[in-house]
């Protein structure tokens, strides 16, 4: 038997087009995520910090990797400038990443 895959989100990525998204979580403190459109926009959290060259909001990239079973918090600025947990996104293990 084959499982129905229509409409399911991708968990393995090869030469995947994506965009770097920078999220401000406090004054001068940021989180960086990879946004894919498969089939709708969603954020993925790299399991290792991105290299400085990729820490550019809106940067178009191509990457290879696999979604991990755990997730990471996207944070937002709190009322006293201490980051607060907002929502969770899947973690991803990157095997390669390059600018488009």
Image (spheres, helix red, strand yellow):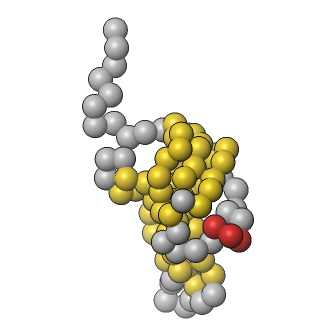
Residue 50: x and y, percent? Answer: 67, 63
The residue located at (62%, 71%) in the rendering is 55
In the foreground, 40 or 14: 14
The residue located at (52%, 40%) in the rendering is 13
Residue 47: x and y, percent? Answer: 65, 53
Which residue sits furthest front?
A: 100
The residue located at (51%, 84%) in the rendering is 78
2 relative to 76, above or below? above
Q: Is residue 70 visible in this depiction of the protein?
A: no
Q: Is residue 99 visible in this depiction of the protein?
A: yes
Residue 62: x and y, percent? Answer: 54, 53
Q: Is residue 52 left or right of residue 80?
A: right
Quadrant assignment for the N terminus: top left
The residue located at (48%, 38%) in the rendering is 11
In the foreground, 70 or 11: 11
In the foreground, 68 or 79: 68
93 relative to 88, above or below? above
46 relative to 59, above or below? above
């Amino acid at each position: 038997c084959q499982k129905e895959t229509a409409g399911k989100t991708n968990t393995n990525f090869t030469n995947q087009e994506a965009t770097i998204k920078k999220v401000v979580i406090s004054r001068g403190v940021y989180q960086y995520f990879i946004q894919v459109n498969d089939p709708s926009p969603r954020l993925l959290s790299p399991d290792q910090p991105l290299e400085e060259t990729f820490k550019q909001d809106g940067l178009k990239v191509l990457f290879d990797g696999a979604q991990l079973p755990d997730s990471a918090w996207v944070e937002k600025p709190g009322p006293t400038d201490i980051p607060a947990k907002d929502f969770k996104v899947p973690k991803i293990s990157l095997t390669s990443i390059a600018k488009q």
